[in-house]
Image (cartoon, helix red, strand yellow):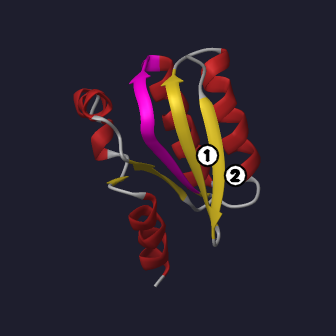
């Protein structure tokens, strides 16, 4: 299944809604390119994983790379609604200590606003 990425904007936060698998190769490249284009505009990115049922090590590396790029620009990348399988992978790799995970897009966007206040 190819990865589909829909883009939304909420104020100065970009929301990427992913549907499919985040894996190494062409499928993951879609997310990387979309996020890279947004990082030049704002370093505040939310990645909604509600529609993602599988992520491999290349996909994890992609998320970490985007996280670092956002941090280097003074922002952050937040994750929303990962399924249990994805949460387990984040926990096993200790990435759950790095990524902030939220229940829905509104909570993640609101967290950006609280960080500024």
How many C-alpha atoms fall within 10 Å of the one at disc 1: few (<14), some, or many (≥20)? some
Q: Position of residue 17 (x, y in %)?
A: 55, 44
From the image, tell me which residue sits under label 1.
69
Name the image quarter holding the N terminus.
Answer: top right
Q: Main secondary structure of the magenta part?
A: strand
Instruction: State the extent of the magenta-drawn residues as a range.
Output: 45-57
Picture residue at 67% right of the left edge, 17% below the top:
26
The numbered mark at residue 11 is none
The reply, left or right, for residue 108 in relation to residue 2 is: left
Residue at 45% across, 35% down: 51
Q: Nearer the viewer, mark 2 or mark 1?
A: 2
Q: Residue at the spot x=23%, y=27% of the render?
A: 92
Distance of mark 2 from mark 1, alpha carbons? Answer: 8 Å
Q: Residues within 10 Å of mark 2 (few under 14, many from 20)?
A: some
User: Helix, strand or loop at disc 1?
Assistant: helix
Question: Among all residues in the image, which is located at the extreme bottom?
Answer: 117
Q: Are marks 2 and 1 in contact (CB under 8 Å)?
A: yes
Helix, strand or loop under label 2: helix
Q: Image point 57% across, 41% down: which residue?
A: 66
Question: What label sits on residue 39 in the rendered view?
Answer: 2
Q: Can you say whether 20 is above or below 96 in the image?
A: above
Nearer-the-camera pick, 35 or 72: 35
- 102 in relation to 16, above or below: below
Residue 86 colored magenta? Answer: no
Nearer to the camera, 109 or 99: 109
Q: Is residue 8 above or below residue 3?
A: below
């Amino acid at each position: 299944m190819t990865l589909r990425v829909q883009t939304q904007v909420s104020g100065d936060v970009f929301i990427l809604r992913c549907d499919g698998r985040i894996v190494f190769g062409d499928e993951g490249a879609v997310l990387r390119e979309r996020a890279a284009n947004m990082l030049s505009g704002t370093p505040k990115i939310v990645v909604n994983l509600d529609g993602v049922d599988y992520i491999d090590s290349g996909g994890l590396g992609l998320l970490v790379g985007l996280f670092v790029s956002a941090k280097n620009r003074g922002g952050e990348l937040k994750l929303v609604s990962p399924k249990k399988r994805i949460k387990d992978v984040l926990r096993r790799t200790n990435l759950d200590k790095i990524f902030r995970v939220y229940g829905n897009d509104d909570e993640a966007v609101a967290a950006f606003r609280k960080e500024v206040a």
